Amino acid sequence: MIVDAFYAAPAVLILALAVYTTVVRGTFAASVGFLAYGLLLTITWVQLHAVDVALTEAAIGAGLTSLLLVRASHRLRESEAAIRAETPGLPLKLAAGLVAGIVGGGIALAVLTLPEPAPTLAPQVAANLAATGVGNPITAVLMAFRAMDTMLEAIVVLLALVGVWSLAPDRAWGGRQGPRYNADPDGILAFIARVLPPIGIVVGIYIFWIGADHPGGKFQGATVVAAMWLLAMLAGLTDAPPIRRRWVRALLVAGPLAFVAVGIVGVYAAGTFLGYPPDAAKALILVIEFALMPSLAFTLGLVMAGAPERPEEAA
């Protein structure tokens, strides 16, 4: 009974938070609800022994996405009253709820009616894991068996940053992102921003470093490093670089370009794009990982910094 309650409690709380996040009227309250929802999902993935997925959910879902939503809710604060005045009527709400219920019920039915044992490619992954040279099957899947998807994910993150930049006013194009934060140099935020980033950067690099053979990886590690950079910016200890600088753009594209370059090498060395020769598979995967880590950290940090708001000369 205790074990059942241990697994059932997070599931009940997740459902409750999902309903709360959907029906609550304030955007900030909904963002906080989504953050708590992501943290509970992280706990659930740990319970299911999917540590890699839990790390991704904590970093990307509960962390990065929640922070984006909080920033958006802050920007919408002035117009929130007008948005509430345009709230749809009860019939539309009921229709939306009915559609959501049908979709959710359909997904639940599909999961519950899966054959026993459920279809899986795990045996094939295990049989071919040694050919990749890495010990973590998740890394093997992401970097070998579905490397094209992983490459496109990195490119999508870069395109998301371009979309954020496109929101900049003409006067600030090419300048610095977000406002210039000036926290109290003797305050708690400045203190935390001096103490936490060195620890966080080491943790992020460690999560990245062990990803080849243990739970972890570049996306999770890059998110932690980006969060430490944002903390320093929020405390006023550093500032976002002007986006017109060539080194900024070079660092952003270095990781995806390295991925594409290794893919082209695979055409000549293994006969297919992103194919790895057996004796060089792990080396090529590590080349991609080491190139992507700083690019992803830099890209995620700039995405969170927002659109350029100040000319380059503004400090």
Image: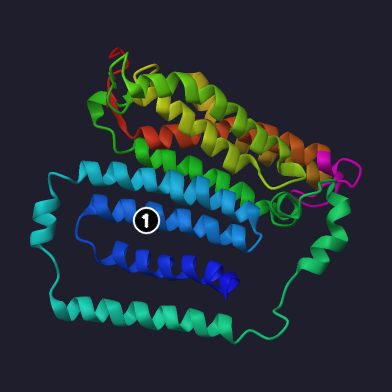
Q: Residue at x 58, y 54 (%)?
A: 54
In the displayed structure, 115 sits above or below 232; it is below
In the displayed structure, 294 sits above or below 59; it is above
Closer to the camera in the image, 185 or 279: 185
Does the magenta stretch mainly form a helix, a strand or a loop?
A: loop
Residue 174 in sight here = no
Q: Residue at x 58, y 42 (%)?
A: 220
Residue 133 drawn at (x, y percent): 85, 46
Would you say 114 lies left or right of 83 here? right
Q: Residue at x 74, y 34 (%)?
A: 287
Residue 87 in sight here = yes
Residue that extends furthest to the front in the rendered view of this protein = 2
Closer to the camera in the image, 25 or 133: 25
Q: Which residue is mark 1?
A: 34
Q: Residue at x 45, y 45 (%)?
A: 63
Q: Residues within 10 Å of mark 1 (few under 14, many from 20)?
A: many
Which secondary structure, mark 1?
Answer: helix
Closer to the camera in the image, 269 or 51: 51
Query: Which quadrant is home to the C terminus?
Result: top left
Residue 190 drawn at (x, y percent): 37, 19
Would you say 5 lies left or right of 21 here? right
Residue 289 among magenta residues: no
Would you say 212 lies left or right of 231 here? right
In the displayed structure, 305 sits above or below 62; it is above
Give the residues drawn in magenta, as a range: 269-282
